[in-house]
Each structure stands twice: as structure tokens, then as C-alpha cells.
Image (cartoon, rainbow, N blue to C red):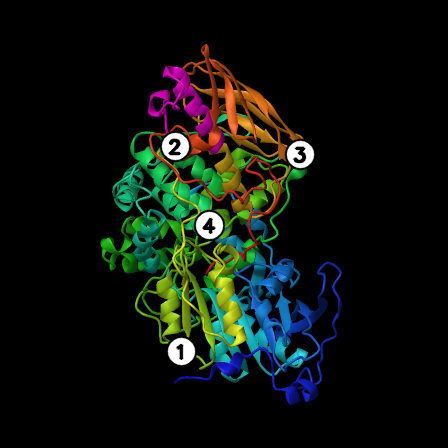
Amino acid sequence: MRRRRTTLLAVPLLSLAILAPRAIGAPTIAFTPCRRISGFSCATLPVPLHHADPALGSLHLRIARRLAGSSPSRDAVIALAGGPGQAALPLAGYLAGAIAPALHHRDLIVFDQRGTGQSSPLHCKALREAIAGPDSIGRTVRRCGEQIGAARGAYTTAESVQDIEAIRQAAGYEKLVLYGTSYGTKVALQYAETYPSHVEALLLDSVVPPQGVEPFGLSTFRAIRRVVAEICSEHACRHIAAHPVAEIARLAAQMGRRRLHGFVYDGSGQRHPAALGAEGLLGILLAGDLNPALRAMLPAAVHAALHRDAAPLLRLEELSAGLVPSVPPHARRPSPESVDNALFLDTSCEDGPFPWNRASPPASRLAEASSALHAIPSRAFYPFSPSAALNYGLTTACAHWPYGSTPPAAESPPVTQSPAAATRSSATATRSSPAATRASAAATRSSVAATRASVAATRSSGAGTPSPPAAALPDVPTLILSGAQDLRTPTADAREVAAMIPDAKVLVVPHTGHSVLGSDLSGCAQAAVAAFFGGGEVQPCGPSPNLFAPTPAIPRRLSDIQAIAGVAGRAGRTLGAILATMLDLDRQVIGATLQADQTLPSGSSFGGLRGGYARLSAKALLLRGLSFVSGVRLSGIFPVRSGRLGTAMVHIGGRAAAHGEVSIGSGSRVSGVLEGVHFNIDLRTVKAAGAGSRQAARSWPAGLLPDRGLLPRGRIRPRRLRALAP
């Protein structure tokens, strides 16, 4: 039925604004000013470990509240972070900004969900001590569950729903506006099912269906063609590949038979062997949900790998895993958005109606999962194979989990939904540990305990035949935000949920991945939220350019470089290689900053694609044999003054290069002498020609870095919610 838009008007009737008390009952929770969250007051609320049996113990929820203005309503907004396992309190300021249009007359409640952050966080030693090797997966997962103990059955979405109701009652609110991102949308929807009369409205960003998701990721695989098509729209990939998805399929098939092998260079220029399987390629795709730079670099990296150049794709995997840049030990710090790995594993396994009988031993569970997987046509996983879907997900890990709760619904064989993609939590954990080395990072990535629970947090609830229908969702104003390039929670999931709620509005945001409000660069989603809570019409997003256009085909040799106009012979090709090297470094800095989602610390260093390194600090940018094109090396020191990159004389060497020196910096011209050839070139004309490549390439947004000066300072975009659907 049609509802009146006045239900969400931010301004209440004057009489209510004057006479209505802030809450419906006497609050039973006392808030005091937060020590570390400006503008909020904090409190701790004890709740039962198991709401159905309070005698089994309790835990404590840490809550922050920001009061509305002078005319508060009876309702509040509760903001739910992703994960499962992401602490919300460190994001309180961001959340207040994202949901600001709803807060004129409503309080904001932010809390760390049970087992995360400051709300009795979960820990298990087994995850920290994970050893590489396939046999360790089962042991690690089983030991983690045993170390958590009998309480492991208490960290489910259903218990979190009861926590929200306990907060509502203790704080004295009548109704709640539920704002969730990814896993937070699942919690919000389950609360709406359980307590429909207490829900005023729903704002769902990157939605997870309330009945759970499937373990094999069919909606994700169905979305790959559409997502790649948008990345390559306006013929942006025509000089890379005529059929980019077919190239992904060819490469995935090759990598399924034999892993891709090659080398990567670390931040000190040291070469290390690296290998990647088909599930790793899938992981890069899913990591791109949270990083448009990864999406932009993937088509060219796939094309290169198909033509016997593994280096770009292997380096891209390092970037997606958070291993780029190298960071000095004293500068390592955890991400403000890190996920509690023990809680993630616990909730994901306990919540997931996997395609097996929970009472069966692990071997039988795996056999049942394999049977369910093989019942699905292989073409449903294109451009990947069923085995890639199985190996990337949490199915093999959770088969070893010692269950502590009853299934969320009657057990049934599986239907699948999208797996979640890679999070940066293991990457930031690697940075924050002084003892972390490349060898230990590789070992960590090879164990599911850290890979699937830290690096590649994968959606793996759900089962093989359709789950029982979700309970009726309340007929309340609902806005669902979906990124057109989101693979872990595709738009198909958003439309599925919208069909359950009368008049729900789905807003699809072009060129945007997961966690829309934190990654939409167009402003369309923010305008929609303002209209939704202001009583206006939510308008569809208009056409917008892809600000992160695909990078050009990657040159391997100097002969692949187009000479710069006006500079003859090998000197012109070398100059093209120099500019391409600097542009590649610029993109690596942007990609790494987006991946970390925080300012890169001074001392961050980047290995070159073909050797050497670049080190960034507050005082200088150092290049030491930095190579993007084989046989062309750049060395020099760029001064940094007042946060801006100065001009440097860069020495050019290498067996293939025209040797000499080039003056280059933040200005618009580059000059120098290469092999006796003098030149003075306007960089603006060079950029228009694609920096010497054989194809034109649109630049990435000029405003993302402070002055396009390769400086590790300044946040590129608002902090995002760490959203990993279960």
C-alpha cells in the first residue's frame, strides 16, 4: 500500500515537539561524557550471554549516544556496523555525519555489538598461532571454537537482535530507525522481523537478505559480467581486451589447473617469489568492492597475465591484501576499522545454515557440501569454476566448527548467495605487528583462519535449496542503497529485500562498490538520504563518469612504449617510460591509501613492478632504481616542502634505457637530456596522450591526493564501514 511521505518528516508537530518527553519510560542506563568520542556520551549495559537463559552469565555492551537538538522525538537512530566483528564506536563521528539528515529530532545510538571492540571482545589464541598448510585449517577452526568455549553459541545475529531491544528499553525509546551496512543490514532486518512495532524506518546500505545468504556465491558470480561491463563502459577497455570477462574466464581456468607464478618486489627492492590460484583472482575481484583503484587496475593485469607477464596481477594481489606499501615497524598501526577475527568466525559459522547436518563429523559435512555444490550447473559460476567458489568461501572452514547453538532455521540443502570479499583486517594486523614479515604474511594468507576470517572474509551463510521464507517485514519507510559495482552484496540482493517491504526504494549508485555512503564519490547517495528523511522524493542517480577509469595495457619492454612527440628514437620511448613509471607510482599510492583507508605513514615504501623502490616521507620522495618497464630505472630524491613535492633531477639508467637526467616535479613541464637528445615538454600534452603508452588513458581524479604529488598525507575519502556480509 502507499504510505504518506510525512511519516519521515524531520520536523514533528509543534505540540509534540513541546510536550513530548524524550523517551517513553524512565531510562535505566546512565550516560556520561565519552572520553574519546567528541559530542557523545557513553554507557555500559549488561545483557545476558543467552537472552533465553539469563542464568548462564552476562556480558557488557559499550554504547555511545549523541542527543538530538532541543525538540527530541520519542525515537532514536541505531547505527549498525558491518562484519560480523567490526567495532562501531571508532566510527561514531562518521556515522553521525552519514545519517545527519535523520538526527535533527532523533538521538543517535552507536554500540559495539557483542564480542567486538569494547563489548566483551572475543579472542582465540588459535587464530594468532595459525600455521600454513591445508591440514591446519580444520585444526585452527576447531581449536578456536574450543578456546572460546561453551559461550561460542551466544554470538549469533539473533542474540544481537535481543541486545538492540535491551538497549531500546534501557534508554527508553519508543521506536528505532535502523541504519545498517552489509552485515549490519542483516541485524537490522532480523530486528524488524522480530520487533516490527518498534521500527520507525530502515536505511539499508549494501544489503544482506534477512533469511541469510548462501555459501557458494551465485548472485556474486551472476553480477560479475554486469560489474566488469560498467568498469569498461564507454569502450574504456577496448585497447586492453575486446572481451574482459572472457579473459578473466580464460585466466581463471588456467590458474585452476596451475597456479600463476612470478615475482614481486617489496619496499626495499627485494624480489620475492609469489603464486596465485583462481580463488586468489576471485579475491582480488571482491576486494575491489571496497577499492575502485583495484577495479581499475584489474583488466590490464589480467590481460598481462594471459600474455605471460604475471608481475602486475601478483602485485595487485599484494595490494588487495594490504601488503603494499611496506611500512617501517615504528609506524605500523592497526586500522580504525579492523574486524574481530574470532567473532567473525564464530558468528559466520554459527549463523550459517550450511548444506550439512550440524551433528555430522567434519568429513561428512564436507561431503554434503560437495554434493550440494555439484548439484549446481558449472555455468552458474562463470567466469570461475565451482571449486574456486568452494575454496574461496568459509564452507571448508566452518565444516570443522564445533557448534554451540541451534540452527537459525530448519537445516536444508543449499542455495547460494554472494560471498563477501576481502577485508583489510589481516593486512592491518600484519602492519601493526613489528614481527610481521613477508614470509609470515604468506603463511597467514594460506591458512583459512586468517585468510578467510581476516583477509577474505567471505559470506557463507545459507544453504542449497531456498531457505524458509523470512518473517514478514514491517511496512515502514525503507531506503536501500546498492553500489552498481558491489559484488559481495549485489543489487539483486537489494531488490530481493525490497520485494519484501511495500514501497521500499532501491537506489543503485553507478561506479560505486560496497558500503555506498562511504564510497560514493558522486553525492547521489547522500542526496537520497537527505530526501528520504526530509520528506522529499528520492531521485535516481543520473549519468556520471567513471572517475577510476581502467589503467592502460601494461608495457613490459621499452618497445611497448610509444615515443613522446617531439623527442626522437629511443630517447622518446625512454621519456614515455619515465612518465609511465611516475604515473604507476602515483596510482599505487592512491590504491594503497584507499586500501588502508587512512593516511599512509611517513616511511611507506613501494616496490617497483620490475624492480627498485620508492620511499615516501614528510621530507622527501626517494626513488632507487624504480622500474615499471624492464630495463628502465629511475633514481633521485624529490624534496618535500610544506607538504608539496618539489622538482628533482632524476637519473635514468638500465640496460634498455637512453641514459641521462630528467628534471621532473609538480610543475607542468619536464626537461632534460637523454642520450644527447635535449627536450622540454609540456606535461599536459603528454597526459592527454596517455603518458607514452600505446593507448590514451583518462586520469584518475586529480583531487584525490593533495596535489598529485605522491605524498602520503590526507584522507582520500570518508571512512567507510567495514562491511563483510556473513
Q: Residues within 10 Å of mark 1 (few under 14, many from 20)?
A: some
Name which of mark 4 and mark 1 comes first in the sequence.
4
- Estimate the x, y position of residue 650 in percent, counting from the top left: 55, 20
Whether residue 50 is visible to the viewer of this picture, yes or no, is no
Q: CA distance from mark 3 to mark 4?
A: 30 Å
Name which of mark 2 and mark 1 comes first in the sequence.
1
Which image quadrant for residue 51?
Answer: bottom right
Describe residue 707's horizontal placement relative to residue 471 as left or right.
Answer: right
- In the depicted view, which residue is nearer to us: 430 or 414? 430
Range of residues picked out in magenta: 555-583
Q: Residues within 10 Å of mark 2 (few under 14, many from 20)?
A: some
- Estimate the x, y position of residue 146 in percent, counting from the top left: 54, 58
Residue sticking out furthest to the top: 676
Name which of mark 4 and mark 2 comes first in the sequence.
4
Tell me the number on the disc at residue 689: 2
Residue ID for mark 4: 422
Residue ID for mark 1: 503
Q: Residue at x 66, y 61 (%)?
A: 118
Q: CA distance from mark 2 to mark 1?
A: 49 Å
**Residue 446 magenta-highlighted:** no
Q: CA distance from mark 4 to mark 1?
A: 33 Å
- Of badges 2 and 1, the one in the foreground is 2
- In the depicted view, which residue is nearer to us: 564 or 324? 564
Residue ID for mark 3: 618
- Of badges 4 and 1, the one in the foreground is 1
Cβ–Cβ below 8 Å for labels 1 and 3?
A: no
Q: Residue at x 44, y 57 (%)?
A: 398
- In the depicted view, which residue is nearer to us: 706 or 462? 706
Whether residue 350 is visible to the viewer of this picture, yes or no, is yes
Q: CA distance from mark 2 to mark 3?
A: 32 Å
